[in-house]
Amino acid sequence: MPIASNFTSILSKDWEINFTQCAPNGYLKYTDLCNILQLTAAAHSEIGGISFLDMQEFNQAWVLSRMRVEIDALPKWGDIVTVKTWINSLENSRSVRALEMYVNGKKIVGSETFWAVFNTKIRRPEGLALPFKHFELYPDTRATKHSYSKINLNHEKEIVFEKTVFLSDLDIVDHVNNVKYLEWCLDLVDEKLILNQKIESFEMNFLKELSMKDNVIIHESLNETETTYSITKEDKTSFALQLIWK
């Protein structure tokens, strides 16, 4: 699709929180929070001419490599949230995108995301085949207090779950959807911590693809202020999640 006439380098988009997106406490699930952020990023790429459909002409897609989310509060059922997004950096095969969520003008969530251009045919990263110089970049305007990082996995951990990848875990790029990794791990957390909104921030590293029928092991490492999960296939780490507690 061509660049839309209403294209702007900073996009604000409203979403209404519906009951299917909420946990039993009536507040937005952390997984659906990530979905809303990513849908906003997708909407911005669509009006900017670098959407999934645009990129598929060259067998390309944006895939998420790292994501940090800092949470002051979660919206609840019926809230209208405004998500604001802009790009910090965009060059060759990688991009850093900022996102913020507001309710009634108050910022409640900030996120920094790192994306890579992925060739869906040869399953490898490569340079973006589409023009992108029309995006104004905002390298100094950050959405989070801290940037995303490489999660440290060099600590004691235990196996807590084993899983096989099924069709419902896959997305349009034919690998495990990034939110699915988060869902698998959060299902292993004490539900009281989730329902009482004790997560201050979380960070995700997406390291290797997982595909249909892959068998994986989920590991957990605990201390007073944080919990780290890692998902491995044949002793190689595919995903890491760090939860920081309030």
Image (tube, grey):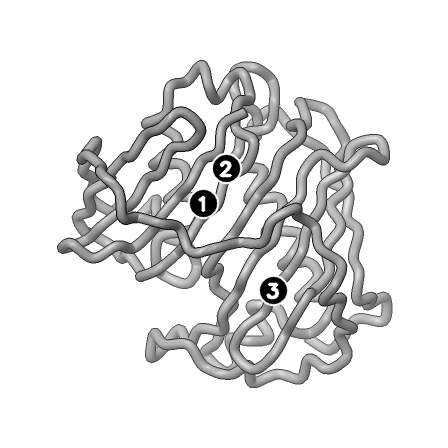
Query: What kind of residue is marked 3?
Result: Val
Residue named by callout 2: 31
Query: What kind of residue is marked 1?
Result: Val
Mark 3 element type: strand
Q: Residue at x 48, y 56 (%)?
A: 66
Q: Earlier in the sequence, mark 3 or mark 2?
A: 2
Mark 1 element type: helix
Mark 2 element type: helix
Q: Is residue 7 above or below residue 167?
A: below
Q: Is residue 3 above or below residue 152?
A: below
Front label number (3 vs 2): 3
| Lateral position of residue 96 relative to residue 207, left or right | right
Task: Tally the marks.
Answer: 3
Residue 179, which numbered label?
1
Q: Are marks 1 and 2 in contact (CB under 8 Å)?
A: yes
Residue 96, which numbered label?
3
Q: Residue at x 54, y 25 (%)?
A: 246
Q: Quadrant of residue 16?
A: top right
Dot 2 alpha-carbon crowd within 10 angstroms: few under 14, some 14 to 19, many 20 or more:
some
Q: Residue at x 63, y 74 (%)?
A: 90
Q: Quadrant of the N terminus?
A: bottom right
Q: Are marks 3 and 2 in contact (CB under 8 Å)?
A: no
Dot 3 alpha-carbon crowd within 10 angstroms: few under 14, some 14 to 19, many 20 or more:
many
